[in-house]
Amino acid sequence: MINKQGLWFVTLFSLILVLSIYYVTIKDDDLLAIAKENTPVSAPVSSIVDTTESSVIVSLRVQDEEEMLEEIKALQTILLDNEASLQEKNDAYNSLQVINATQGKKEALEKKIKSTYNLDCFVKIKNDQITVTIASKDHNSTLANNIIRSIQEEYEEKMYITVKFQG
């Protein structure tokens, strides 16, 4: 007697066999017609994408991303250069590690500000200076002080933190 698992196997195998034979014997014209009929009509992209960030934040992110990519490209050139000394390659590698760590810290700080204060922001970290740009028309000094304190909590050493409001 055939068990359930064997029956399912035979059923699915025969279904796959029938579909593959049908696919092999179908004409290309019929296949194109079926594909055109089943193509979904898409809505315009502007109605699908919800833009919540201000253009100031987006432009700052793009500018920072371009600067970072240029620096990474220069460091990778040093790493791949056969004539570079071992010390130069080590320094370039360490710089790449610092860039990666800084990028991770930026994202963490932006996420913290977004979750804590529900504000869109851009964070730029350079050495011991942190610049936070908030997408808001309201210039609230209490909010800025709270943001500075919450960022400073993430670091053991003293950081120079500035908060800018741009609407």
Image: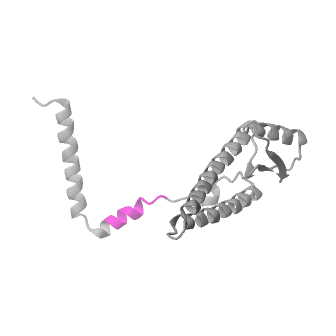
Quadrant where the image shows the N terminus: top left
Which sits in the foreground, 49 or 115? Answer: 115
Residue 51 percent across, percent down from the top left: 69, 54
Residue 25: quarter of image: bottom left
Q: Residue at x 73, y 50 (%)?
A: 123
Which sits in the foreground, 47 or 83? Answer: 83
Q: Is residue 48 left or right of 129 when viewed as pictured?
A: left
Q: Residue at x 77, y 39 (%)?
A: 152
Image: magenta residue range: 31-40
| Colour mapping | one colour
Residue 45: quarter of image: bottom right
Which sits in the foreground, 20 or 128? Answer: 128
Q: Is residue 92 left or right of 38 when viewed as pictured?
A: right
Q: Is residue 97 left or right of 52 when viewed as pictured?
A: left
- Determine whether 2 is above or below 75 in the image: above
- Determine whether 161 is above or below 4 in the image: below
Residue 52 percent across, percent down from the top left: 71, 51
In magenta stretch: residue 33: yes
Q: How many marks?
A: 0
Q: Residue at x 22, y 62 (%)?
A: 24
Q: Residue at x 22, y 43 (%)?
A: 12
Residue 9 percent across, percent down from the top left: 20, 39
- Determine whether 3 is above or below 143 in the image: above
In magenta stretch: residue 101: no
Residue 111 percent across, percent down from the top left: 68, 42
Q: Residue furthest left?
A: 1
Secondary structure, magenta segment, majority class: helix
Quadrant where the image shows the C terminus: bottom right
